Amino acid sequence: YRKAAEQGDILAQNNLGVLLHAGHGVQQDDVEAYAMFCMAAEGGCTNAVDSQDSLAESLTPEQIADGHRRTIYYKALKSSH
């Protein structure tokens, strides 16, 4: 899912967010999961909106800011291809 998510596939972003949050097959990382949910939500994935909101409740303001920085990074990465 990682490559597809980085290329802008919103379903891959949402699914990768789920895996990252749960730690299934990848190292558990809620900040990265939040970033994936943010990107998928911006792309119109309604499940990601709910997941983003739910996950944000357990993150610190610093973690949320880090998630947004990662989202900006991935958008820049995508536009450079």
Image (cartoon, grey):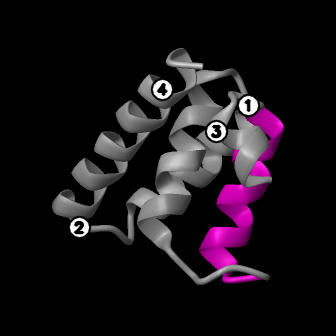
Residue at 72%, 57% (x, y): give it: 16
In the rendered structure, which disc, 1 or 3, sits on the residue that comes first in sequence? Answer: 3
Callout 3: few (<14), some (14-19), or many (20+) C-alpha neighbours within 10 Å?
many
Q: Position of residue 17 (x, y in %)?
A: 65, 58
What label sits on residue 45 in the rendered view? 1
Judged by depth in the image, the label closer to the viewer, 1 or 3, is 3
In the rendered structure, which segment of residues is drawn in magenta?
Answer: 10-24
Depth check: 30 or 49 in front?
30
The alpha-carbon separation of the residues under discs 4 and 2 comes to 23 Å
Q: Position of residue 56 (x, y in %)?
A: 40, 58
Judged by depth in the image, the label closer to the viewer, 4 or 2, is 4
Residue at 78%, 82% (x, y): give it: 25
What label sits on residue 60 in the rendered view? 2
In the rendered structure, which disc, 3 or 4, sits on the residue that comes first in sequence? Answer: 3
Q: Which residue is mark 4?
A: 75
Amino acid at pointer 1: Cys
The alpha-carbon separation of the residues under discs 1 and 2 comes to 24 Å
The alpha-carbon separation of the residues under discs 4 and 1 comes to 16 Å
In the rendered structure, which disc, 4 or 2, sits on the residue that comes first in sequence? Answer: 2
Q: Which residue is mark 3?
A: 6
Element marked by disc 2: loop
Residue 21, quarter of the rendered image: bottom right
